[in-house]
Amino acid sequence: MSDEYSSKQSYSLFEHVLHEDTMFNDRLNFFLIFESVIMGIVGVLYQKSTPSLPIIRTLIVLAIILTFIWGYVQARQKWMLDCLTARSLKEMDDYRAIVEERKRGKWPIGNLALLAYVVPTVVVVLWLTLLFTLS
């Protein structure tokens, strides 16, 4: 650890990283639940004997917009976490040792990248497929 960083400052940095990670996961959970609720509503409306296609299409378009917002928010939060991680690597020797040990693993893609980019992309593809196959 560098000389200018005290134990208290390191702890503060660690707390900030933990807070941002918690925010990332909380937002992910919120959006997944919200998307699931919209999916359920679309399913219920489509199963009616005379489904109202304009209403269903409107809900799907709103869900697509929400998914793009979700993707943006998650990507931004990942960027913030990446910045804090880089700073932590410079300032905290213990953290740097743990990260270097983890890099020796066989996992080429990190969880944050998958959760920030892949999951929203899969969800938007699902919504677009529903929108264009709705009859």
Image: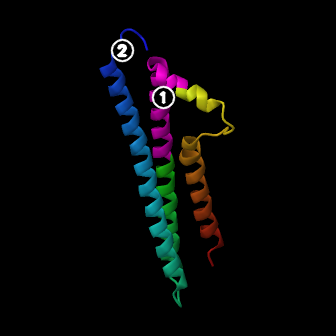
Q: Position of residue 14 (x, y in %)?
A: 38, 29
Q: As drawn, which residue projects farthest toward the bottom?
A: 49
Between 84 and 39, the one lying in front of the other is: 84
Q: Would you place residue 104 above or below residue 120 in this image?
A: above
- Is 56 left, or right, of 110 in this rendering? left
Between 120 and 115, the one lying in front of the other is: 115
Quadrant of the snapshot with the C terminus: bottom right
Q: As drawn, which residue projects farthest toward the left?
A: 8
Number of the label disc, if any, that sits on residue 5: 2
Q: Where is residue 19 in the image (x, y as percent from the top left)?
A: 36, 38
Q: Residue at 44% across / 20% down in the picture?
A: 92
Amino acid carrying label 2: it is Tyr
Which numbered disc, 1 or 2, marks the residue that appears first in the sequence? Answer: 2
Is the magenta region chiefly helix, strand or loop? helix
Amino acid carrying label 1: it is Thr
Instruction: Tell me where the magenta segment starts and ends, as one range.
Output: 72-97
The residue that disc 1 covers is 85
Q: Where is residue 40 in the image (x, y as percent from the top left)?
A: 49, 73
Is residue 102 a member of the stretch shown in magenta? no
